[in-house]
């Protein structure tokens, strides 16, 4: 992988690498509240089986994960744990924020204990709105993330450029 | 929590029953109350029985620990359900969809006299509330005690019910009540560095400092409002068809 660091990735190789990454996303599930149940329905249940998209939702640890799906109410108390989880993931890593609570605090917008949006602590790639989002919405978010991975310039990402703006679903 | 207990303010069912020819009584709960009265004496400040439903006993602050022992040993209520507190002051921040009326911010705090306690009343603003139950029956006792407005403190229950420790930690961080004798009053739900007691009514909701409740702009007009004549016309038609 020295090629990526050197910034001289041949285009066909980039394409092949991105194609491989796109269809082998190991997604870590960080379920914090009721959206976690919806995430289970969208990721693992037979109707919306996410493995057909090439996403494996069962890594044993964040150290093996490419993607973390944060779903549910983020409280100020759990913020350090989320940050540590994110730091433990190897680069390149992606974050999907699922549900209104994770996006912006949702119904707990005036709460004394709820963090108003997980994007205050980790950079979010995809926002999936909804309370809770439909499974189709989460899958749409995953497909949008795969598009982003497909079109990514890994060398630029390595240099810290090309992070890309967050994409809201819908 | 405060809202749950506030519903106790609903018109007491005893009023219509008093007009009825026969008065409903509850011997089992009367007997349970008698046990408390026998052991606590004058410390039982006030009580309320809702026949067939529940028993509320307000005890003096000093008798709080004794009340737990009486509940467990003499009354047989061995199962500790929960311990919490209630701030009876109305919230200055409004409630739910009325909250757009919150302006100006910060709203003035309600007068101390505006605090209206629920069943069995209260001499102070904040009350400690606990529930114990008699296993194998439907008998359950709500115990209440007043705590001082300025220096809220009360005896701990952990020597009687070890499980009360976490509940007291929560009541301590949410209401600032000192449970004398509990050696482990640390934050349980809130971050370690959290300041303030968020379930006290004067706790500022910082998000509301920035903007008033935004949801009102999303709410659809209520049926029967001034500006939905179409709906009323439609409803009238529907009624006509149904009739």
Image (tube, coloured by chain):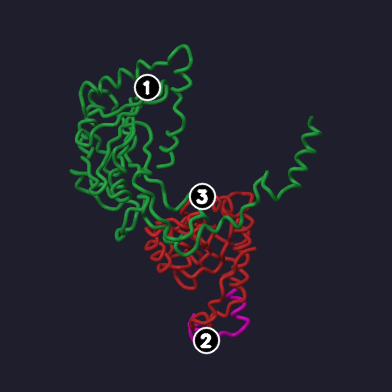
Chain colours: A red, B green
The residue closer to the viewer here, B74 or A53, is: B74
The residue stretch that appears in magenta: A1-18
Pinpoint residue A126: horizontal percent, then vertical percent: 56, 66
Pinpoint residue A80: horizontal percent, then vertical percent: 37, 63
| Structural crowding at the residue carrying mark 2, measured as other residues with C-alpha within 10 Å and reported as few (<14), some (14–19) or many (≥20) | some
The reply, left or right, for residue A146 in relation to residue A124 is right
For mark 1, give the secondary structure: loop
Q: The disc numbered 2 marks a residue on which chain?
A: A
For mark 3, give the secondary structure: helix
Read off the residue under disc 1: B137
Asked if disc 2 and disc 1 are in contact, CB closer than 8 Å, the reply is no
Read off the residue under disc 2: A7
Pick the quarter of the image with the C terminus of chain B.
Answer: top right
**Does residue A70 appear anywhere in the picture?**
no
Pinpoint residue A167: horizontal percent, then vertical percent: 59, 69
Residue for point 37% across, 58% down: A77
Residue B135, located in which quarter of the rendered image? top left
Residue for point 53% across, 50% down: B98
Tags 1 and 3 both on a single chain = yes
* Badge nearest the viewer, 2 or 1: 1
């Amino acid at each position: 992988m020295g090629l990526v660091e050197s910034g001289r990735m041949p285009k066909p190789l980039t394409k092949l690498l991105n194609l491989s990454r796109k269809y082998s996303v190991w997604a870590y599930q960080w379920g914090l509240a009721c959206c976690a149940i919806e995430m289970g329905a969208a990721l693992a249940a037979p109707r919306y089986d996410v493995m057909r998209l090439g996403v494996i939702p069962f890594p044993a640890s964040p150290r093996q994960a490419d993607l973390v799906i944060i779903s549910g109410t983020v409280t100020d108390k759990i913020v350090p744990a989320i940050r540590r989880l994110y730091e433990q993931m190897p680069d390149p890593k992606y974050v999907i924020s699922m549900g209104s609570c994770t996006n912006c605090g949702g119904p707990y917008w005036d709460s004394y204990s709820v963090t108003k949006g997980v994007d205050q602590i980790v950079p979010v790639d995809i926002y999936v709105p909804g309370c809770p989002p439909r499974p189709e919405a989460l899958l749409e978010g995953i497909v949008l993330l795969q598009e982003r991975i497909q079109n990514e310039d890994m060398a630029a990402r390595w240099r810290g450029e090309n992070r890309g703006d967050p994409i809201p679903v819908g | 929590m405060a809202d749950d207990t506030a519903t106790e303010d609903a018109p007491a069912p005893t009023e219509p029953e008093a007009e009825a020819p026969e008065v409903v009584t509850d011997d089992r709960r009367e007997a349970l109350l008698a046990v408390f009265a026998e052991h606590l004496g004058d410390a039982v400040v006030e009580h309320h029985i809702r026949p067939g439903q529940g028993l509320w006993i307000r005890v003096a602050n000093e008798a709080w620990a004794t009340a737990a022992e009486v509940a467990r040993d003499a009354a047989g209520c061995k199962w500790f359900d929960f311990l919490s507190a209630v701030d009876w002051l109305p919230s200055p921040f409004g409630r739910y969809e009325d909250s757009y009326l919150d302006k100006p911010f910060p709203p003035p705090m309600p007068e101390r006299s505006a605090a209206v306690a629920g069943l069995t009343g209260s001499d102070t603003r904040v009350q400690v509330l606990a529930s114990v139950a008699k296993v194998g029956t439907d008998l359950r006792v709500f115990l209440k005690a007043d705590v001082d407005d300025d220096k809220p403190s009360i005896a701990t229950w952990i020597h009687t019910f070890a499980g009360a420790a976490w509940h007291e930690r929560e009541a301590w961080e949410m209401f600032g009540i000192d449970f004398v004798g509990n050696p482990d009053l640390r934050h349980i739900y809130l971050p370690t560095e959290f300041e303030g007691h968020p379930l006290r009514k004067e706790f500022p909701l910082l998000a509301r400092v920035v903007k008033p409740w935004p949801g009102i702009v999303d709410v659809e007009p209520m049926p029967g409002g001034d500006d939905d004549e179409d709906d009323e016309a439609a409803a009238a038609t529907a009624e006509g068809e149904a009739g």
